[in-house]
Image (spheres, rainbow, N blue to C red):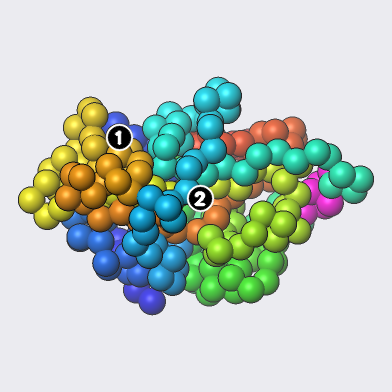
Amino acid sequence: MKLLRSLVKPTGFGPHYRFASSRLRALPTVVLLVQLGSLAVPPMKAWQQQGSSKGSMAGMDMSGDMKDMGPSMAAMAGHMYVTALRPRQRGDEEKVKALVAQVRASIERYRDYHKALEDGYVIGNPNVDEPQFHFTKEANVLEAEHHFDPTKPSSLLYFQTPTQRYKLEGVMFTVPPTASQDELNERIPLSVARWHKHINFCAAPANRVKEYLGKHPKFGMFGLINTADACKAEGGTFYPVIFTWMIHVFPFESDLKDVFSMNDDIPHFGSAQ
Protein backbone atom coordinates (compact mmCIF):
# COMPACT_ATOMS: atom_id res chain seq x y z
CA MET A 1 0.00 0.00 0.00
CA LYS A 2 1.36 3.34 -1.00
CA LEU A 3 1.38 6.10 1.58
CA LEU A 4 0.48 9.68 0.82
CA ARG A 5 3.53 11.78 1.47
CA SER A 6 4.62 15.37 0.83
CA LEU A 7 1.59 16.66 2.67
CA VAL A 8 1.09 20.21 3.79
CA LYS A 9 1.30 20.94 7.51
CA PRO A 10 -1.74 22.80 8.88
CA THR A 11 -0.92 26.23 10.18
CA GLY A 12 -0.76 26.60 13.93
CA PHE A 13 -0.71 22.96 14.98
CA GLY A 14 2.04 20.77 16.35
CA PRO A 15 3.68 17.51 15.37
CA HIS A 16 1.00 14.91 16.04
CA TYR A 17 1.38 12.39 13.16
CA ARG A 18 2.73 13.15 9.75
CA PHE A 19 1.19 11.29 6.83
CA ALA A 20 -2.08 9.66 5.81
CA SER A 21 -2.77 6.29 4.25
CA SER A 22 -3.94 5.79 0.72
CA ARG A 23 -6.88 4.01 2.32
CA LEU A 24 -8.31 7.50 2.84
CA ARG A 25 -8.80 8.03 -0.90
CA ALA A 26 -12.52 8.30 -0.24
CA LEU A 27 -11.82 11.72 1.26
CA PRO A 28 -11.13 14.64 -1.08
CA THR A 29 -7.40 14.96 -1.76
CA VAL A 30 -7.32 18.44 -0.32
CA VAL A 31 -8.58 17.06 2.99
CA LEU A 32 -5.43 14.99 3.21
CA LEU A 33 -3.17 17.74 1.94
CA VAL A 34 -4.50 20.42 4.23
CA GLN A 35 -6.13 18.79 7.22
CA LEU A 36 -4.08 15.65 7.70
CA GLY A 37 -0.75 17.01 6.60
CA SER A 38 0.65 16.75 10.10
CA LEU A 39 -0.86 13.36 10.84
CA ALA A 40 1.35 10.30 10.53
CA VAL A 41 -1.20 7.59 10.17
CA PRO A 42 -0.48 3.95 9.42
CA PRO A 43 -2.13 1.92 6.66
CA MET A 44 -5.70 0.98 7.37
CA LYS A 45 -8.68 -0.82 5.95
CA ALA A 46 -12.15 0.56 5.40
CA TRP A 47 -12.42 1.67 9.00
CA GLN A 48 -13.41 5.20 8.10
CA GLN A 49 -16.85 4.12 6.90
CA GLN A 50 -19.44 6.83 6.74
CA GLY A 51 -21.90 6.85 9.58
CA SER A 52 -24.93 8.53 10.99
CA SER A 53 -25.36 10.26 14.29
CA LYS A 54 -26.46 6.94 15.74
CA GLY A 55 -23.22 5.27 14.69
CA SER A 56 -20.91 8.08 15.71
CA MET A 57 -18.87 8.01 18.89
CA ALA A 58 -18.89 10.72 21.48
CA GLY A 59 -15.33 11.47 22.44
CA MET A 60 -14.34 11.11 26.02
CA ASP A 61 -14.60 14.30 28.05
CA MET A 62 -11.00 15.40 28.05
CA SER A 63 -11.46 18.62 30.03
CA GLY A 64 -9.77 17.13 33.05
CA ASP A 65 -6.93 15.78 30.95
CA MET A 66 -6.01 18.86 28.95
CA LYS A 67 -3.23 19.74 31.37
CA ASP A 68 -1.48 16.52 30.37
CA MET A 69 -1.72 17.21 26.64
CA GLY A 70 0.32 19.40 24.36
CA PRO A 71 -1.39 22.01 22.18
CA SER A 72 -1.50 19.76 19.11
CA MET A 73 -3.38 17.04 20.98
CA ALA A 74 -5.66 19.39 22.91
CA ALA A 75 -6.61 21.13 19.67
CA MET A 76 -8.36 17.94 18.57
CA ALA A 77 -10.80 17.82 21.50
CA GLY A 78 -14.10 16.59 20.12
CA HIS A 79 -12.25 14.51 17.56
CA MET A 80 -10.45 12.14 19.91
CA TYR A 81 -11.53 9.23 22.02
CA VAL A 82 -9.16 8.53 24.90
CA THR A 83 -9.37 5.44 27.07
CA ALA A 84 -10.07 5.99 30.75
CA LEU A 85 -7.59 4.79 33.33
CA ARG A 86 -8.64 1.51 34.92
CA PRO A 87 -8.02 0.50 38.53
CA ARG A 88 -4.51 -0.84 39.00
CA GLN A 89 -4.38 -4.64 38.94
CA ARG A 90 -1.72 -6.83 40.48
CA GLY A 91 1.18 -7.18 38.06
CA ASP A 92 0.21 -4.25 35.81
CA GLU A 93 3.14 -2.04 36.74
CA GLU A 94 5.65 -4.87 36.53
CA LYS A 95 4.30 -5.87 33.12
CA VAL A 96 4.58 -2.32 31.83
CA LYS A 97 8.08 -1.79 33.16
CA ALA A 98 9.23 -5.01 31.50
CA LEU A 99 7.61 -3.93 28.24
CA VAL A 100 9.23 -0.50 28.36
CA ALA A 101 12.64 -2.06 28.97
CA GLN A 102 12.08 -4.34 25.98
CA VAL A 103 11.09 -1.42 23.77
CA ARG A 104 14.09 0.61 24.86
CA ALA A 105 16.53 -2.22 24.17
CA SER A 106 15.02 -2.99 20.77
CA ILE A 107 15.31 0.57 19.45
CA GLU A 108 18.82 1.41 20.64
CA ARG A 109 20.18 0.76 17.15
CA TYR A 110 17.84 3.38 15.77
CA ARG A 111 19.58 6.24 17.54
CA ASP A 112 21.24 6.34 14.15
CA TYR A 113 18.22 7.06 11.97
CA HIS A 114 20.02 5.62 8.96
CA LYS A 115 19.58 2.21 10.59
CA ALA A 116 15.83 2.79 10.68
CA LEU A 117 15.80 3.58 6.98
CA GLU A 118 17.85 0.47 6.29
CA ASP A 119 15.28 -1.60 8.18
CA GLY A 120 12.34 -0.32 6.17
CA TYR A 121 11.06 2.61 8.20
CA VAL A 122 9.90 5.55 6.07
CA ILE A 123 10.08 9.19 7.13
CA GLY A 124 6.77 11.03 7.14
CA ASN A 125 7.12 14.52 5.62
CA PRO A 126 10.94 14.68 5.56
CA ASN A 127 10.82 18.04 3.81
CA VAL A 128 8.68 19.72 6.44
CA ASP A 129 10.54 21.50 9.22
CA GLU A 130 8.80 20.43 12.42
CA PRO A 131 9.75 19.27 15.92
CA GLN A 132 8.74 15.60 15.76
CA PHE A 133 8.93 13.05 12.96
CA HIS A 134 7.36 9.62 12.57
CA PHE A 135 9.30 6.91 10.76
CA THR A 136 6.66 4.26 9.94
CA LYS A 137 7.14 0.66 8.83
CA GLU A 138 4.09 -0.73 7.06
CA ALA A 139 5.04 -4.36 7.70
CA ASN A 140 4.94 -3.70 11.44
CA VAL A 141 1.59 -1.96 11.18
CA LEU A 142 0.12 -4.92 9.35
CA GLU A 143 1.53 -7.37 11.91
CA ALA A 144 0.09 -5.25 14.72
CA GLU A 145 -3.40 -5.93 13.39
CA HIS A 146 -3.10 -9.49 14.68
CA HIS A 147 -0.15 -9.69 17.03
CA PHE A 148 1.62 -7.42 19.50
CA ASP A 149 5.41 -7.42 19.38
CA PRO A 150 7.02 -4.69 21.53
CA THR A 151 10.17 -4.96 19.39
CA LYS A 152 8.25 -4.03 16.23
CA PRO A 153 6.64 -0.62 16.71
CA SER A 154 4.49 0.79 13.95
CA SER A 155 6.52 4.01 14.04
CA LEU A 156 9.73 5.35 15.51
CA LEU A 157 9.53 8.87 16.93
CA TYR A 158 12.33 11.37 16.41
CA PHE A 159 12.46 14.89 17.84
CA GLN A 160 14.36 17.72 16.19
CA THR A 161 16.87 19.56 18.39
CA PRO A 162 19.00 22.62 17.59
CA THR A 163 21.91 20.33 16.73
CA GLN A 164 20.22 17.13 15.54
CA ARG A 165 17.32 16.80 13.09
CA TYR A 166 16.42 13.23 14.03
CA LYS A 167 17.00 12.41 17.69
CA LEU A 168 15.28 9.21 18.81
CA GLU A 169 12.75 9.65 21.60
CA GLY A 170 10.26 6.82 21.35
CA VAL A 171 7.80 4.71 19.38
CA MET A 172 4.17 4.48 18.37
CA PHE A 173 2.11 1.29 18.53
CA THR A 174 -1.15 0.84 16.65
CA VAL A 175 -4.14 -1.50 16.85
CA PRO A 176 -7.17 -1.62 14.52
CA PRO A 177 -9.93 0.68 15.82
CA THR A 178 -12.25 -2.32 15.98
CA ALA A 179 -10.18 -3.74 18.84
CA SER A 180 -11.87 -3.79 22.23
CA GLN A 181 -10.42 -2.00 25.22
CA ASP A 182 -9.81 -5.38 26.79
CA GLU A 183 -7.55 -6.15 23.84
CA LEU A 184 -5.75 -2.86 24.35
CA ASN A 185 -5.38 -3.72 28.01
CA GLU A 186 -3.76 -7.02 27.12
CA ARG A 187 -1.10 -5.21 25.11
CA ILE A 188 -0.43 -2.33 27.48
CA PRO A 189 -2.47 -2.19 30.72
CA LEU A 190 -5.01 0.61 30.75
CA SER A 191 -4.33 1.26 34.41
CA VAL A 192 -1.00 2.78 33.41
CA ALA A 193 -1.38 3.97 29.82
CA ARG A 194 -4.10 5.56 27.72
CA TRP A 195 -4.71 4.73 24.08
CA HIS A 196 -6.54 7.09 21.74
CA LYS A 197 -8.14 7.14 18.33
CA HIS A 198 -9.42 9.88 16.06
CA ILE A 199 -13.15 10.22 15.56
CA ASN A 200 -15.96 12.46 14.31
CA PHE A 201 -14.25 13.70 11.15
CA CYS A 202 -16.35 15.92 8.90
CA ALA A 203 -14.92 16.19 5.39
CA ALA A 204 -15.76 19.48 3.72
CA PRO A 205 -17.68 19.56 0.44
CA ALA A 206 -15.49 20.30 -2.59
CA ASN A 207 -16.53 23.94 -2.79
CA ARG A 208 -15.59 24.64 0.84
CA VAL A 209 -12.20 22.97 1.22
CA LYS A 210 -10.55 26.33 1.99
CA GLU A 211 -12.43 26.26 5.28
CA TYR A 212 -10.02 23.67 6.67
CA LEU A 213 -7.66 26.56 7.31
CA GLY A 214 -8.19 29.52 9.55
CA LYS A 215 -8.49 30.22 13.24
CA HIS A 216 -11.90 28.61 13.70
CA PRO A 217 -12.38 25.88 11.07
CA LYS A 218 -15.66 23.99 10.87
CA PHE A 219 -14.34 20.90 9.09
CA GLY A 220 -11.66 18.31 9.72
CA MET A 221 -9.62 17.16 12.69
CA PHE A 222 -9.51 20.62 14.25
CA GLY A 223 -13.02 21.66 13.21
CA LEU A 224 -15.99 22.73 15.27
CA ILE A 225 -18.21 20.06 13.68
CA ASN A 226 -18.09 16.72 15.48
CA THR A 227 -21.52 15.17 14.88
CA ALA A 228 -23.05 13.50 11.83
CA ASP A 229 -26.10 15.77 11.86
CA ALA A 230 -24.07 18.97 11.98
CA CYS A 231 -21.81 17.66 9.23
CA LYS A 232 -24.75 16.78 7.01
CA ALA A 233 -26.28 20.21 7.58
CA GLU A 234 -23.09 21.79 6.22
CA GLY A 235 -22.98 19.46 3.22
CA GLY A 236 -19.99 17.51 4.51
CA THR A 237 -19.23 13.79 4.67
CA PHE A 238 -19.03 12.31 8.16
CA TYR A 239 -16.60 9.61 9.29
CA PRO A 240 -17.24 8.37 12.85
CA VAL A 241 -13.80 6.76 13.10
CA ILE A 242 -10.64 7.27 11.10
CA PHE A 243 -7.23 5.72 11.57
CA THR A 244 -6.29 3.24 14.28
CA TRP A 245 -5.98 3.03 18.04
CA MET A 246 -2.62 4.63 18.82
CA ILE A 247 -0.25 5.03 21.73
CA HIS A 248 3.14 6.71 22.06
CA VAL A 249 5.77 5.21 24.30
CA PHE A 250 8.85 7.17 25.38
CA PRO A 251 11.07 4.48 26.95
CA PHE A 252 13.97 6.79 27.82
CA GLU A 253 11.84 8.57 30.43
CA SER A 254 12.10 7.28 34.01
CA ASP A 255 8.59 8.15 35.26
CA LEU A 256 5.81 6.01 33.77
CA LYS A 257 3.63 9.09 33.45
CA ASP A 258 6.25 10.58 31.14
CA VAL A 259 6.80 7.27 29.35
CA PHE A 260 3.16 7.40 28.23
CA SER A 261 2.89 11.18 27.94
CA MET A 262 0.22 12.63 25.65
CA ASN A 263 2.27 15.75 25.08
CA ASP A 264 4.07 15.38 21.76
CA ASP A 265 5.09 19.03 21.61
CA ILE A 266 8.02 18.57 23.99
CA PRO A 267 10.96 16.13 23.72
CA HIS A 268 11.07 12.95 25.78
CA PHE A 269 14.72 12.01 25.95
CA GLY A 270 14.75 11.30 29.68
CA SER A 271 18.26 10.85 31.02
CA ALA A 272 19.48 9.57 27.63
CA GLN A 273 20.71 12.93 26.40
Q: Is residue 153 visible?
A: no
Q: Which residue is mark 2?
A: 197
Magenta span: 93-101
| Residue 109 within the segment the image draws in magenta | no
Q: Is residue 91 visible?
A: yes
Q: Is residue 102 left or right of residue 233?
A: right
Question: Sequence order check: which comes first, mark 1 or mark 2?
Answer: 2
Q: Residues within 10 Å of mark 2 (few under 14, many from 20)?
A: many
**What label does residue 224 carry, if any?**
1
Q: Residue at x 75, y 58 (%)?
A: 186
| Image quadrant where residue 154 sits | bottom right
- SS of the residue under disc 1: loop
Of the pair 102 and 42, the residue shown nearer to us: 42
Residue lying at the far left in this picture: please name it. 207
Instruction: Say above or below: 216 vs 100.
Output: above
Question: Which residue is pictured at 30% across the width and 61% down the height?
Answer: 5
Residue 153 x/y as whole percent: 60, 61
